[in-house]
Image: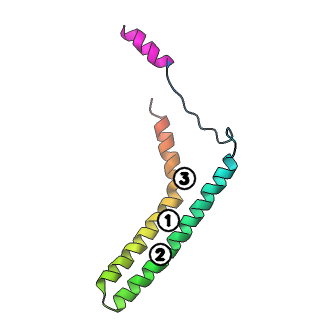
Amino acid sequence: MALALFVKLQLAAVSIKPNPSGGPGTPALEKLVNWLAAVVLLGCAAGLLIGAAQWALGSKSNNFSHASDGKQKVLYSLIAAFVVGAGAALINFFYTSGQAVK
């Protein structure tokens, strides 16, 4: 009985093999994702500049709340830029790690 169930489960196994050239519009989607990453990086640069200015002005005027908010904006902008830059490597790492699971 257990052997029959095992064989049935093996026959019903699902396999996923991504093929970027398999579907229509893949080059356009890749261009869209690259454009979106560029827009996000521009937003990170703007956030970094705004945060740095707020940090500097808050420090000079002894407004520690604004200085702290500026530091947070700088940190969040840097973290977001790191995630955008490392995104493809992280996705590929977890994809290949998931393929090792049997």
Give the distance between the C-alpha atoms of the residues marked 2 and 3, in whole angstroms: 23 Å
Mark 3 lies on a secondary structure that is helix
Give the distance between the C-alpha atoms of the residues marked 1 and 2, in whole angstroms: 10 Å
In the visual, does 37 lie left or right of 2?
Answer: right
User: x%, y% of residue 16?
Assistant: 55, 32
Name of the residue lying farthest toward the bottom: 61
- Disc sitting over residue 48 in the figure: 2
Which residues lie in the magenta part? 1-11
Asked whether residue 7 is drawn in magenta, I would say yes
**Residue 77 in the image: above or below residue 32:** below
**Residue 74 in the image: above or below residue 23:** below
What residue is disc 1 on?
A: 81
What residue is disc 3 on?
A: 88
Q: How many marks?
A: 3
Mark 1 lies on a secondary structure that is helix
Residue type at tag 1: Ala
Residue type at tag 3: Ala
In the visual, does 41 lie left or right of 59?
Answer: right
Asked whether residue 57 is drawn in magenta, I would say no
Name of the residue lying farthest toward the front: 24
Choose the circle earlier in sequence order: 3 or 1. 1
State whether the magenta stretch is mostly helix, strand or loop. helix
In the visual, does 71 lie left or right of 89?
Answer: left
Are the residues flagged by discs 1 and 2 in contact, CB closer than 8 Å?
Answer: yes
Which residue occupies 49% across, 20% down? 12
